[in-house]
Amino acid sequence: MGAAMRRIHVGNALSAFGLGFTVPYLYVYVAQVRGLGAVTAGLVLAVFAVAALIVLPFAGRAIVRRGPLPVLIAALVTAAVGALSLGLAGNAAAVLAAAGALGAGQAVMQPALATMIVDCSTTETRSRAFAMQFFLQNLGLGVGGLIGGHLVDTTRVSSFTLLFAIEAAMFLLLVVVMATVRVPHAPRVEGAPSGSAKGSWKQLLGNRAMVQLCVLGFVLFFACYGQFESGLSAYGVEAAGISTSALGTALAANTAMIVVAQFAVLKFVERRRRSRVVAAVGLIWAVAWLAAGYAGLGHGSQEMATAAFVSTYALFGLGEAMLSPTVAPLVADLAPTGLAGQYNSAFALVKQLALAVGPAVGGPMGASLHAPYIVTFLLFSLGISVLALRLGRQLTVAQDQPWQARNRVVARGGTAAEPVTAEA
């Protein structure tokens, strides 16, 4: 791992630590500590999603034109201002404005950091680089949430102000770290439209494989991440009688599975077709939903129901560990030369859409329509497998089996480290 990649990974860990520091406590802070009520707290969470949906269509174009590093630094400064303002805001208007700045900055960080990983890696090292990114993100979120929980006191506004000030300091520290990164100069964009961003999006939508991957990505995030803190938790409490402590254990099991399994599954995943790995994840998540169904609809003891519910989150974590070295590198390999930023932003936009729609659909279903909820998301998980296999027919060998493509390069007298250019 080169010096640039090490700094990028430190940046990922710091940004995740900052988010884990405050995000779990936003609702309590706005609704109770500031006394602005549940409606305003709900609007703050909605503003995060809306801000991301507004800025992401423009972020990709900016990354292509300016490079990922200037865009990342601008996003970090914006997020730092938003975090500090959120800690000082005393009325609804100020809280919503600060949440918009923080949400926009956080959203742009993702594709900018992903593009920097692409620029500083080769097809041979990319899967491991993204696996490390996902590992550090989860570790940072977990450690940040743990420390933040011990600092806050709902009877003292100053404790939350300190929390948001530390988050802002993390983002500014990340600016300093990132400013020292020497990112390789991105190659000139070949055949890219020189006009408006509309032309760039039209070119992206003309890539059938990328469009299919975006559809698959929406279903992935809708059926998993979009349910974690909404539909699935509501279902666990209402249908399975899961206590809040058991729910916390389930979330911890998810993180623990990712931390333990990430590098254990990496060697296995690297030698398999990416499309088939994603298809396998769909089957694993189908088993997870069956376990959730048993927890809430079965007739076992409360202990059995709790164990089944915890295993649901653990199985989701196993699938996530398989996806991290698979999907993000595939997005990079589908991008034409120089357009990785545009493609990363498009996929991040799809993710945000899924995370916005998922809780809105899954929350009410999980709380009241227990059997239909399980059946619906069981079918979505099986749909992931079908969509992944269909996507595999659109991919080249270099995109679906990069290790096989490297072996062919060696057989022709090249080197395994030689990057393989993917077709658009």
Image (cartoon, helix red, strand yellow):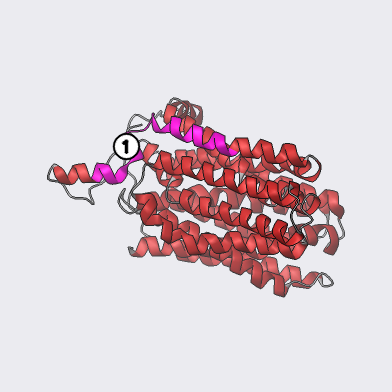
Tell me which residue sits at (75%, 68%) in the image.
Answer: 160
Tell me which residue sits at (21%, 45%) in the image.
Answer: 407
User: Looking at the magenta stretch, what is its main secondary structure?
Assistant: helix
Q: Is residue 205 left or right of residue 298?
A: left
Q: Quadrant of residue 380?
A: top right
Asked if the stretch drawn in magenta spans residue 253, the answer is no
**Which of 66 and 370 lies nearest the eye of the viewer?**
370
Residue 147 drawn above or below residue 33: below
Tell me which residue sits at (76%, 42%) in the image.
Answer: 370
Residue 342 drawn above or below residue 32: above
* Image coordinates for residue 182, horizontal then vertical, percent: 36, 59
Q: Is residue 346 left or right of residue 419?
A: right
User: Quadrant location of the C terminus?
Assistant: top left
Query: What residue range appears in magenta?
Result: 381-406
Q: Which residue is mark 1?
A: 422
Tell me which residue sits at (62%, 60%) in the image.
Answer: 19
**Which of 70 and 366 lies nearest the eye of the viewer?**
366
Q: Secondary structure at mark 1?
A: loop
User: Quadrant location of the N terminus?
Assistant: bottom left
The three-letter code of the residue at mark 1 reads Ala
* Image coordinates for residue 327, horizontal then vertical, percent: 45, 44
| Residue 352 seen in the figure | no
| Residue 278 seen in the figure | yes
**Which of 44 and 372 lies nearest the eye of the viewer?**
372
